[in-house]
Image: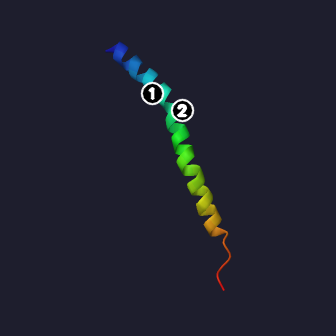
Amino acid sequence: MRGTLSDRMGAALLMAPLLLFLVLAYAWPFLGVVKWSFTLPTPG
């Protein structure tokens, strides 16, 4: 039981940087577009 838990913790620690990278890779450009859309001048 304890070995399985430590294996899961090790896998989670290995996956954490990948998940963080994926979140940043998708969220950062999206947030940039949202910020850009708020700074657009009003038409007319």
- Measured as percent of width and height from the top left, residue 19 is found at 49, 37
Which quadrant of the figure has residue 5? top left
> Residue tagged by mark 2?
17
Q: Is residue 1 above or below residue 12?
A: above
Q: Is residue 3 left or right of residue 35?
A: left
In-front residue for pair 2/29: 29
- Measured as percent of width and height from the top left, residue 8 is found at 39, 23
Residue at the image position 59 percent from the left and 53 percent from the top: 29
Taking the view exactly as shown, the residue that stands out farthest to the left is: 1
Within 10 Å of disc 2 (Cα), the crowding (few <14, some 14-19, many 20+) is few
Within 10 Å of disc 1 (Cα), the crowding (few <14, some 14-19, many 20+) is few
Q: Is residue 3 above or below residue 21?
A: above
Q: Is residue 34 left or right of residue 2?
A: right
Residue at the image position 62 percent from the left and 57 percent from the top: 32
Mark seen at residue 12: 1
- Residue type of the residue flagged with mark 1: Ala
Viewport quadrant of the C terminus: bottom right
Mark seen at residue 43: none
Q: Secondary structure at mark 2?
A: helix
Q: Label 2 vs label 1: CA separation?
A: 9 Å
Q: Is residue 29 above or below residue 42?
A: above
Q: Is residue 36 left or right of residue 11?
A: right
Residue at the image position 52 percent from the left and 44 percent from the top: 23
Q: Is residue 4 left or right of residue 33?
A: left
- Measured as percent of width and height from the top left, residue 41 is found at 68, 76
| Tally of marks | 2
Asked if marks 2 and 1 touch (Cβ < 8 Å), the reply is no
Q: Secondary structure at mark 1?
A: helix
Taking the view exactly as shown, the residue that stands out farthest to the bottom is: 44
In-front residue for pair 44/4: 44
